[in-house]
Amino acid sequence: MMKTFVHRRKDITEEELMDYSAFCQLLPGASSTQTLTLIGYKRGGVVLAMLTLLIWTVPACCLMALFSFFPLRTTAIFRFIGPMTIGFLAFAAQQAFRVSIRNTITRVILVVSTIATFLLFQWPWIFPILLVMGGFVTTLSSKRIPQVDILPKKIKWGNIWLFAIIFVLAGAGSELARKNNWPNRRPLNLFENTYRFGSLVFGGGNVLMPMMYEQFVARPQSQKLIQRNPNIIRMSKEDFYTGWGMVRAIPGPVFSVASYMGGIAMKDKGTAFQILGCFIGATGIFLPSALLVLFFFPIWNNLKKYATVYRALEGINAVVVGVMVAAALYMMKDFKTASWADISLNLLVITATWAMLSYSKLPSPVIVLVWLGLGWGFILF
């Protein structure tokens, strides 16, 4: 972005780009997508912002939607994609640790959020509760980030109403459809799931992954939940890992994986519903990002003056690291039914993926292709 929009095209200044990036880090959702949306907004208002959003997201979403129509998981070429995905998550957690865990309180938040997430992974409210608690705890101290020489101004929160109304209506509609056993209610449930992900994910795709895993893979394994809601959206861990492996191998935003997940969630209902699922997944995941960034940006110049915002972000980031660590450990539980040879091989793949990301300059798509190639070799030999 710096090279293209600042140095080459001169659409924005370097200071503006850094300001946009800092602002988007404070919001949930796809931060790279939000930053590009703001560049479009600055150059041509809401219309160009929406056009920029579409150009950035549609190609990747279409490609991931296409993947959902093919039974890729039945091929042994994807043998190493599952542990490779955990290796990506472990690397992301390590990088986030270096940036976000700097003092005693963030270390405590990290440990608590890791343990709580691991033990309550199948409880969907654990993520937002931990984010709120982490942000609250770090706002209690003004020593690290004091508020100085700032005259606080009243912030008008009216611009967030549309986002909140959609959030409430999506949740209420999904729950009402479940309780009343509406036929063909799955699209409503899917929109609520993906809209909630886009509204609560701090930290990008590496935090989206454990949230999706909990919702679509781990949670539906509960027999109590199945008895209460037999039509719950579910998918196999093989399908899940395949999607996350492939989204690393294509250009575009990682959040486009929601298009694939939506297609897989609707696959048993026929082609028309599968296409609808891809559309709902992509729309649900990116809509909150667009609403938040466009509605909050006009008040950003006031909001960024509050040290409380940055104190809260300190705790939120510590929770994000804890969620990533817990998710990596929780996903490794899938290996427990494998033989010792398979467990050792999976651990080797995780370690090798982490090492390639840490000590080589190989881009993510190349690493994915390496494991796909080894998977192909695994078939032959």
Image: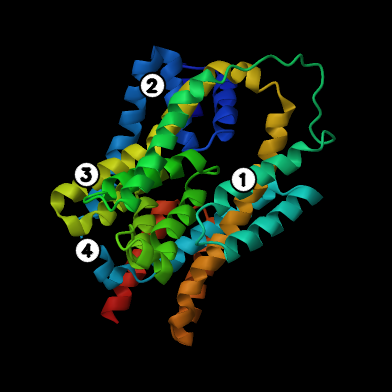
First in sequence: mark 4 vs mark 1: 4
Q: Name the residue at the front extreme.
A: 180
Q: Disc 4 designates what residue?
A: 71
Q: Residues within 10 Å of mark 3 (few under 14, many from 20)?
A: some
SS for dot 1: helix
Callout 4 touching callout 2 (CB < 8 Å): no
Amino acid of disc 1: Leu
Q: Disc 4 to disc 2, how far (Cα)?
A: 36 Å
First in sequence: mark 3 vs mark 2: 2
> Which residue does the image show at 26% across and 41% down from the upper left?
279
> Which residue does the image show at 59% across and 59% down from the upper left?
117
Q: Disc 2 designates what residue?
A: 49
Q: Residues within 10 Å of mark 4 (few under 14, many from 20)?
A: few
| Front tag of 2 and 1 | 1
> Which residue does the image show at 35% across and 52% down from the upper left?
179
Q: Disc 2 to disc 1, how far (Cα)?
A: 29 Å
Amino acid of disc 4: Pro
| Front tag of 3 and 4 | 3
The quadrant of the image that shows the C terminus is bottom left
First in sequence: mark 4 vs mark 2: 2
